[in-house]
Image: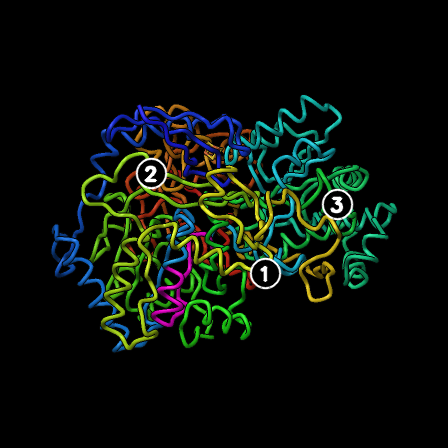
C-alpha cells in the first residue's frame, strides 16, 4: 500500500490528508497528524473522501473522454484529445478574430490548484488580451478581498488558526463554522474547554449549531451587520474602550467614522438589527474589554449587496480597539473553498493581476507584462461572474470556457445564467464529472483530473501553502487542468498574432508553473520566493510571506503596526448601513437565507454520491419557524410552492427552532434533479438559485446569495 500526503479538497480549513492507495485504487484516507491545519483530524466529509472517490456511482459519473457535439440538437459524441483541443483552439480563435478577445469569457474555480489558476490567468490576460476571467471565488470571497485592501492595504488575512487558542473573545459573524469549517470549530470548542473564560459571540439570523455553542447569540435581521458593528463601535467610543494610541499611531480616518457612528446609538442600531439593546452593548463590551479578540467571518458578510461595507465595518472594530497584529487578535475571514486564496494570489479574478497586483494600476500592468514577456496587459476591467453571464445572455460574450465549476446550479438568478449558456456560440466545459447541470449546455466537454489525481499547491484560509499530490492516475483519458489549458494555449499561439517570440507556456510540470508564479511575488506582500517545491517537501506547509532567505513562514501579519498602504497606516472605512437588496414586502413577506449543511459540499457532485453523507439530512426542504408553520396551516413534510421575483420551486416544509419568524432557510446543495419547479422563463428549476438574486456589492461585485424575498403557498 502506498501513502501519499495531500489536502482535503472541500473547505478552506485545508486539512492535511494521507491517501492510502493500492495500484490505481484509493483504499483509505486519514488525517495527516503533522499538518498544522488539522493535526490528524478530519470531519465527516474529509474522512469519507476515499469512499466518495471510489463510489460506484462516482466512477460511473466521471467524464472519461473528450466529447463534442456538432449541433445543439445532437448529443455529444466521444472524440480524441487532438480533435477536441484543435476544435477548442480553432473556435476560440474564430470568435476572437470576428468579435475581439472580450467576446471570450473564462469562468474558473476556487477548486483549481494554484498552478492551474496561474495558467488560465496568463492565457486570458497575457495571450488572448482579455480580462474576462473570473471565478466562483467571486461568489465566495471577493467582499473579504475588497475590504482587506480598502482598510489594511492588502488582501491578506492577518491572523492564523493558532489564534483561536490565544483569544479571550471570539466574535463569529455570518458563519456557521460548525458546519462550514468543522475542524476549525473543533478548535474553538477545545479552546473553550481549556479556557472557560473565553467568550464566544455569534451574530447570525439563525440559531445554528455554532450559535448554540455561543455565550451570546445575536440573532440579527438578515443584512443588518453594518448597523450592528457601527452600534458596537458607538458603545466602544462612549465607554472609553478604544485603543487611542493605536488609532493615533497606526491608522487614518477615525474622526470621520466617529461622526458617522454617532448616529448608530445602541437603541437605533439594535432596532435596525432586531436585537435587544443590552445584547448589542454586551457584545461591544466583550469585544473591547478582552485582552485578545478574534473575529471569524464568512459568507454571511461576503454574499451581500453591501458585502465590502460589512467586512470593512468589522475590521473597523479591530482597528479601533487595536485588536490586530497580536496573538489571539485580528479580523480573520474564513475561505469557503479549498484554494480561493491561491486564486487570489495569482490574480485569477477580473480585476486582479498576479501577486496581489491591481489591474487598474498602470505600473502593475507593466510589471506583469514584463514578467510574462508580453507587450501589454489590457487595461479594460473584465466582467465579473454575474456580469459575465449577463453579457453572454445579451450576446456580447460569444464563447464561455467553464472550468471545474457548475454555474447552471451555483450562480444566482438561474434564468439569466441558462439563457447565457444557451445563447453563447461556444460553451467549453472542463470537468471531472459528466453529470453536472452545466455539462448539458457544453459544445465541448473536456475530462479533467480531480482530487488525488493531480499535483500542485493550495493555500488555505490562514495563508498556508500545502503541496497537493497525485495518489492515483486520472481515469480514462482525463487530464490535469493546467495541461489542458497549456495544450489549447499553444494551439491558440499558432492561430493568433504572436504576442512573444517564443511560447508563453513552456511548462512541462506544475513545478515549472509554480516557479514562474513565485517569481512574480518577489517584493510583494505575499512574497514566496523562498517557497520551492523542495522546501515545501523539506519543511512541510508554510504560511506566506516567505521571501528568499526566510527559513519559515509568518503566522501573523502587522505585528509591527505597519500596514501595506502608501503611508503605512491602516484606513478606517467610513461606510453606512444599507438594507438588503430585496426587502420583504406584502407580496414577498419572508426573508430567505441560504447556507451549507454539515455533510454536503457545494453542488454535491462529490458528496452526493455517497449514501452515508445523507444520514444527517436526507432531502432538501424549506425550514420555517414553528410560528410561520402554524400561521400557514403547515405540517412537517407538506409541500409548498416557494416563489421569488425570479422563479419558483416546490419543497417540503419543515418546522425549525433555528429559524426566526418571517425568515426561512434552504440548503444550497440540491439542484435540478432534486428540486422541481421552474425559473421565470419557464426553464426547469435549478434548486435554490432559481430564487436568489444577482444583486451584488458595488465594490466587490459579489452577489447577495444569502438573501431573497419570497412567498410561500401550500401546494
Ligand atoms: Fe475537509 Fe474542511 Fe472537513 Fe477539513 S474541515 S476535513 S478541509 S471539509
Distance of label 1 from label 2 (alpha carbons): 31 Å
| Quadrant of the rendered image containing residue 421 | bottom left
Magenta span has 125? yes
Quarter that holds the C terminus: top left
Graded by Cα atoms within 10 Å as few (under 14), some (14 to 19) or many (20 or more), the crowding at tag 2 reads some
Give x and y (percent) for residue 294: 69, 40
Q: Which residue is at 54% across, 64% downward?
A: 357
Magenta stretch bounds: 120-138
Q: Which mark is residue 323?
A: 3
Horizontally, residue 644 falls left or right of residue 658, namely: left
In the displayed orientation, state which residue is furthest to the front: 549
Q: What type of secondary structure mainly makes up the magenta span?
A: helix
Q: Which residue is at 68% across, 51% downward?
A: 315
Q: Nearer the viewer, residue 260 or 448?
A: 448
| Quadrant of the rendered image containing residue 53 | top left
Q: Nearer the viewer, residue 499 or 238?
A: 499
From what the image shows, is residue 496 above or below residue 689?
below
Q: Secondary structure at mark 3?
A: loop
Sequence order check, earlier mark of 1 and 2:
2
Q: Which mark is residue 470?
A: 2
Does the rendering let one see residue 585? no
Q: Secondary structure at mark 1?
A: loop
Nearest to the eye among marks 1 and 2: give it: 1
Colouring method of the image: rainbow
Magenta span has 461? no
Q: Which mark is residue 523?
A: 1
Q: Nearer the viewer, residue 109 or 374?
A: 374
Give x and y (percent) for residue 663: 54, 41
Quarter that holds the N terminus: top left
Amino acid at each position: 500500500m502506498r501513502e501519499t500526503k495531500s489536502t482535503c479538497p472541500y473547505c478552506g480549513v485545508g486539512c492535511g490528508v494521507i491517501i492510502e492507495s493500492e495500484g490505481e485504487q484509493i483504499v483509505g484516507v486519514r488525517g495527516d497528524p503533522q499538518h498544522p491545519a488539522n493535526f490528524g483530524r478530519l470531519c465527516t466529509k474529509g474522512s469519507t473522501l476515499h469512499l466518495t472517490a471510489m463510489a460506484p456511482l462516482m466512477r460511473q459519473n466521471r467524464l472519461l473522454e473528450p466529447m463534442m457535439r456538432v449541433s445543439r440538437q445532437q448529443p455529444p459524441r466521444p472524440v480524441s484529445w487532438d480533435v477536441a483541443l484543435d476544435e477548442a483552439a480553432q473556435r476560440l480563435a474564430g470568435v476572437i478574430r470576428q468579435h475581439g478577445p472580450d467576446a471570450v469569457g473564462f469562468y474558473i474555480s476556487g477548486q483549481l490548484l494554484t498552478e492551474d489558476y496561474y495558467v488560465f490567468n496568463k492565457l486570458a490576460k497575457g495571450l488572448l488580451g482579455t480580462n474576462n476571467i473570473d471565478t466562483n471565488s467571486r461568489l465566495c470571497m471577493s467582499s473579504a478581498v475588497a475590504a482587506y485592501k480598502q482598510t489594511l492595504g492588502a488582501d491578506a488575512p492577518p491572523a492564523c488558526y493558532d489564534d483561536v487558542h490565544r483569544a479571550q473573545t471570539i466574535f463569529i459573524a455570518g458563519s456557521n463554522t460548525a458546519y462550514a469549517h468543522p475542524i476549525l470549530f473543533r478548535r474553538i470548542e477545545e479552546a473553550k474547554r481549556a479556557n472557560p473564560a473565553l467568550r464566544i459571540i455569534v451574530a447570525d439570523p439563525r440559531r445554528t449549531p455554532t450559535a448554540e455553542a455561543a455565550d451570546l447569540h445575536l440573532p440579527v435581521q438578515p443584512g443588518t451587520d453594518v448597523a450592528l458593528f457601527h452600534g458596537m463601535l458607538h458603545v466602544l467610543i462612549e465607554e472609553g474602550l478604544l485603543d487611542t494610541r493605536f488609532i493615533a499611531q497606526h491608522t487614518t480616518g477615525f474622526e470621520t467614522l466617529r461622526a458617522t457612528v454617532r448616529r448608530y446609538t445602541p437603541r437605533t442600531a439594535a432596532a435596525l438589527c432586531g436585537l435587544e439593546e443590552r445584547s448589542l452593548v454586551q457584545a461591544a463590551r466583550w469585544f473591547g474589554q478582552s485582552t485578545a479578540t478574534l473575529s471569524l467571518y464568512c459568507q454571511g458578510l461576503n454574499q451581500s449587496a453591501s458585502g465590502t461595507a460589512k467586512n470593512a465595518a468589522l475590521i473597523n472594530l479591530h482597528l479601533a480597539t487595536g485588536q490586530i497584529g497580536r496573538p489571539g487578535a485580528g479580523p480573520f475571514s474564513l475561505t469557503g473553498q479549498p484554494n480561493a486564496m491561491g486564486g487570489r494570489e495569482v490574480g485569477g479574478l477580473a480585476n486582479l493581476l498576479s501577486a496581489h497586483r491591481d489591474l487598474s494600476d498602470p505600473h502593475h500592468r507593466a510589471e506583469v507584462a514584463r514578467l510574462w514577456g508580453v507587450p501589454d496587459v489590457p487595461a479594460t476591467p473584465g466582467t465579473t461572474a454575474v456580469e459575465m453571464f449577463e453579457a453572454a445572455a445579451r450576446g456580447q460574450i460569444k464563447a464561455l470556457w467553464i472550468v471545474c465549476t457548475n454555474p447552471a446550479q451555483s450562480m444566482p438568478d438561474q434564468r439569466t445564467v441558462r439563457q447565457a449558456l444557451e445563447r453563447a456560440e461556444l460553451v467549453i466545459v472542463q470537468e471531472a464529472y459528466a453529470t453536472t447541470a452545466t455539462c448539458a449546455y457544453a459544445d465541448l466537454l473536456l475530462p479533467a483530473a480531480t482530487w488525488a489525481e493531480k499535483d500542485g499547491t493550495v493555500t488555505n484560509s490562514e495563508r498556508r501553502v500545502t503541496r497537493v499530490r497525485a495518489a492515483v492516475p486520472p481515469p480514462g483519458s482525463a487530464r490535469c487542468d493546467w495541461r489542458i489549458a497549456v495544450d489549447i494555449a499553444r494551439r491558440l499561439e499558432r492561430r493568433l498574432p504572436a504576442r512573444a517570440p517564443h511560447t508563453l507556456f513552456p511548462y512541462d510540470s506544475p513545478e515549472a508553473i509554480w516557479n514562474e508564479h513565485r517569481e512574480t511575488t518577489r517584493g510583494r506582500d505575499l512574497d514566496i520566493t523562498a517557497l520551492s517545491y523542495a522546501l515545501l517537501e523539506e519543511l512541510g506547509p508554510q504560511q506566506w510571506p516567505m521571501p528568499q532567505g526566510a527559513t519559515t513562514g509568518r503566522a501573523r501579519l502587522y505585528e509591527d503596526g505597519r500596514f501595506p498602504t502608501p503611508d503605512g497606516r491602516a484606513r478606517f472605512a467610513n461606510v453606512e448601513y444599507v438594507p438588503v437588496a430585496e426587502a420583504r414586502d406584502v407580496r414577498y413577506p419572508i426573508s430567505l437565507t441560504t447556507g451549507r449543511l454539515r455533510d454536503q459540499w457545494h453542488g454535491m457532485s462529490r458528496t452526493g454520491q455517497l449514501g452515508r453523507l445523507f444520514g444527517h439530512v436526507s432531502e432538501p426542504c424549506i425550514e420555517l419557524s414553528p410560528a410561520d408553520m402554524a400561521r400557514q396551516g403547515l405540517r412537517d413534510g407538506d409541500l409548498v410552492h416557494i416563489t421569488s421575483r425570479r422563479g419558483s420551486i416546490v419543497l417540503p416544509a419543515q418546522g425549525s427552532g433555528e429559524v426566526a419568524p418571517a425568515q426561512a432557510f434552504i440548503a444550497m446543495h440540491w439542484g435540478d434533479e432534486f428540486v422541481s419547479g421552474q425559473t421565470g422563463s419557464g426553464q426547469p428549476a435549478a434548486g435554490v438559485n432559481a430564487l436568489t438574486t444577482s444583486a451584488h456589492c458595488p465594490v466587490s461585485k459579489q452577489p447577495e446569495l444569502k438573501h431573497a424575498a419570497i412567498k410561500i403557498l401550500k401546494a
